Image (cartoon, grey):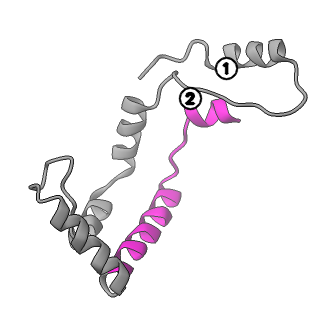
Amino acid sequence: LLSEMFRQPSFPADEFAKLQREEIAARESKRTDPEAIARLAVRRHGNPYRAGDPRYVPTVEESVGYVRAATVDDLKRFHQTFVGGTGEIALVGDFDPAEIRAVLEKEFGTWPKA
């Protein structure tokens, strides 16, 4: 299942839209939360960089705009660019290491590195 999720993701548009709505609501709630307002003000003060700089801290409005502008195609491009065949796995319990190694090699051994 893990191999299928990573190697052949489906990116259903309805699920993306649902997550997008949830993320927008979470970000918009920060407009009236005093703690969130203060935390954002401190972060913006400590990171006085311009938009476009990786250290830039966006306003709530900008942050909501970024989420609204995202598309399923953006997500697909991100996955293709950054998700690749390099990783680590930790297993706990009673298992045969050789058997696990064979399964991992079969499922992920030919996966190109991103």
The percent position of residue 30, horizontal first and vertical second, equals 35, 79
| Local secondary structure at mark 2 | helix
Separation of marks 2 and 1 at Cα, in angstroms: 9 Å
Q: Determine contact: label 2, label 1, CB under 8 Å.
A: yes
Q: Is residue 11 magenta?
A: yes
Q: Can you name the residue that lies furthest to the left here?
A: 50
* Vertical comparison of 32 with 101: above or below: below
Three-letter code, disc 1? Glu
Q: Nearer the viewer, residue 13 or 19?
A: 19
Q: Which residues are magenta?
A: 1-30
Task: Give the crowd class for mark 1: few <14, some 14-19, many >=20 residues within 10 Å.
Answer: some
In terms of secondary structure, what is the magenta stretch mainly? helix
Name the residue located 32 percent from the left edge and 61 percent from the top edge.
67
Image quadrant assignment for residue 96? top right
The percent position of residue 16, horizontal first and vertical second, equals 47, 57
* Left or right side of 29 for 8: right
* Vertical comparison of 69 with 30: above or below: above
Residue 61 appears in the figure:
yes
| Location of the N terminus (image quadrant) | top right
To which residue does mark 2 refer?
7
To which residue does mark 1 refer?
107
Residue 60 appears in the figure:
no
* Left or right side of 53 for 13: right
Task: Give the crowd class for mark 2: few <14, some 14-19, many >=20 residues within 10 Å.
Answer: some
